[in-house]
Image (cartoon, helix red, strand yellow):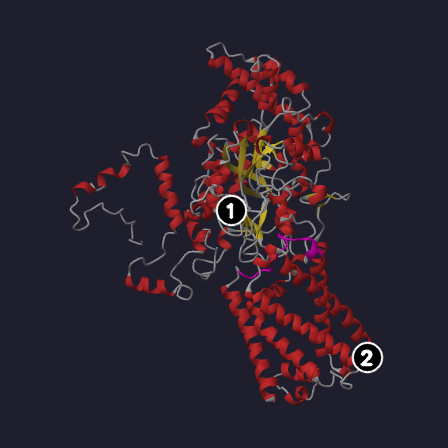
Amino acid sequence: MRVMAQMAMVMNLDKCIGCHTCSVTCKQAWTNRTGMEYVWFNNVETRPGLGYPRTYEDQDEWQGGWVRKPNGRLALKAGGRLKKLLSIFSNPKLPSIEDYYEPWTYDYETLLNSPASENFPVARPKSLLTGKDMQVQWSANWDDDLGGSQEHAARDVMFKGIEDKVKLEFEETFMFYLPRICEHCLNPSCAASCPSGAIYKRAEDGIVLVDQDRCRGWRMCVSGCPYKKVYFNHKTGKAEKCTFCYPRIEVGIPTVCAETCVGRLRYIGLMLYDADAVLEAAAVEDDHDLYEAQRSVFLDPRDPEVEQAALAAGIQADWIEAAKKSPVLRLITDYKVALPLHPEYRTMPMVWYIPPLSPVVDVVKETGEDAEDRGNLFAAIDTLRIPVEYLANLFTAGDVEPVNGVLKKLAAMRSYMRDINLGREPDASIPAAVGMTEEEMYEMFRLLAIAKYADRYVIPSAHAEQAHGLEELATDCAVDFDAAGSHYDQALLGEGAGYPTPVAVENFRMLQDRQTSDSLAAPDDKASRVNLLNWDGKGTPEGLFPARPEGGER
Amino acid sequence: MSTFLWVIVPYLCLAVFVVGHLWRYRYDKFGWTTRSSQLYENKLLRLGSPLFHFGMLGVVGGHVIGLLVPRSWTEAVGIGDHLYHYAAVGGGLVAGVMALVGMGILVYRRRTVGPVFSATTPMDKVMYAFLGAAILLGMWNTIAGSVFSLGGEYNYREGVSVWYRSFLAFQPDADLMARAPIGFQLHALVAFGLFALWPFTRLVHVFSAPVGYLTRPYIVYRSRDSRPGPGSTPSRRGWDRVG
């Protein structure tokens, strides 16, 4: 047993309203640059729909992920090492910019500089690739809210096996949103596809990153990732991907997408897993067994044996404590309501989803029946092939059973909590019907519906004694005579001598303090602060600046 | 004059080539990339790029054999001049035509496909000019000299190749080059110009040919701590300004 820790996320799709706040804040934070105009590390897809890039889930076409060979071993679907090297001069399976969309801006200057004229001036769309006029035909969310789905949605590859049942007529369709980030897989096929070895999985927290100094732009990762979550920066010629906001995670605060999610539907926490068991689990024969196989890889940090092994493997005690409290662990292992996205790609994804009950509720509601009654909901889950089979195609490689199980738990929670909310006697038979105790059900409700900040995000910070290794420091200045001569002078002068605290770490710390302190008006260090209204501007009274740490290193 | 052309210039170019690469690797790892434009356009690339690259691999292989293997060696293993000549011209023509046609397609693509054209840097254009000229002159030497025997017989294995080996051994014999036909002289000069440009163009990607991929494990794990400490990464070009 080789215990490793993995930072993981769960998203509760029932609460996603498709507002795209996660996408926009992520874009502002990470991909608001030339060369990355078309890139969305986080995107929200309307399902049914084509997704972004279009039909990325069609692995017969794109050849992403792994396949199990007849001898029981895993192989990259797009071919092994030799084939990759031979096709390196022209990647046969790279999505073109049209599969994403051609990025554009508008010629706003015409509006501002236009002379007085009879007709209102028009801001034309201009391609950000060529600078020329262009016809806008597609974008990352062209089929948002089923827009144009009459035309497009039938091409959604997740309808495989249920094509005959699908009706996309306006009145009979169903819809939900699927926010997607990089899955930070346990068995990442992007990393395996990279000829340069530039994509790596961090041993401490399992975050998958691209080393920008080692990437040579061969683009094999873009094809290798079945989720199409590695992007090619067409200006720098390097691959870039979601970083799980590692600079934030390292100081214990959630990713930008999670932090800004207005639906509070994202959960972040640690999962411990047995790294030695990953390949075997990813290579089980039947696609339907992959969900269970992946769960079997996870270790329960509350098990003393696991705890011992984790300590022996060098995982710090506070990380093990955090793993015990992980909301992700509760949702995946305890309540079993979270499911992986496309386990059939055999990459062991680590961003899991609680499938939405709302399409089922909507159907029941439309029939005029009580949509919060357990019996009605259970019957609907059992009889509705759509959307249940559609969800199964997304989350369990088409196996309806686990999806049914989750939906029933959610339905049971709905009717159980209704009794409590209406002041009626809670019905203990409801949780029992889905194999849960009343207490468990109530706790699950607290986690899913109340979803307190501290419950949603249990993120241990990276270790202070490792702080010099924090990656953002590597791009920062330091007392290095060779590379940063100016700081040599500074060190001699005294001001700013020694190791500077990296800016982002300092800011994130302050941000976290502000967010987690009880009151803005009465901070702990209030007594030592200076009232600037009484300060005459002369001298520096005690408390004008924060106290220097012991040893005066700053 | 011949000392300047066949001793000073080649060594200058070689020095720029070596030091330039060291400098580039030290200070611009971030810029060390193929700068692929496949995202913009795929159909022409699919045809042109493999043609060009595999052709170039053949061309480079041919040059290695032609320049570095002395005539006496091939004779020692029983390959006569005649047989060698046919193999060299045949192989050279196939590889050369592949590279030339491939490059033609790629240059056409670069000029006509809007996004690719606007992503072309001045350095790219200079490099294409040198590369194209080198290939054309090389083809001319093969065709004119060996096939049609224009301007008399010239056995480069007794001239250019010997000079090249003497050059690599740091005992350059400039006379050998000075007596070579003008086509060979131009080809060599343009090639050395290309070598001098090399470290400052996208050609650096040649030296990151990922052969290590064949032997390394699929999944790479790295620890936060295994990164070099603060300051050991020099300031780099970084991201472009937004807008």
Host chain of mark 2: B
Q: Specify whether residue A403 is painted magenta.
A: no
Of residues A149 and A365, the one nearer the viewer is: A149
Are the residues at dot 1 and dot 2 in contact (C-beta closer than 8 Å)?
no
Provide residue A33's location: percent of width, then percent of height: 49, 50
- Residue A240, labelled with which disc? none
Mark toward the viewer: 1 or 2: 1
Of residues A432 and B212, the one nearer the viewer is: B212
Discs 1 and 2 lie in a common subunit:
no
Q: Residues within 10 Å of mark 1 (few under 14, many from 20)?
A: some
What kind of element bears circle 1? strand
Of residues A203 and A540, the one nearer the viewer is: A540
Q: Residues within 10 Å of mark 2 (few under 14, many from 20)?
A: few
Tell me if residue A66 can be seen. Answer: yes
In the image, the segment drawn in magenta is B31-46
Instruction: Check disc 2 and report the residue beneath it.
Output: B77
Gap in angstroms between the C-alphas marked 1 and 2: 66 Å
Count up the numbered dots: 2
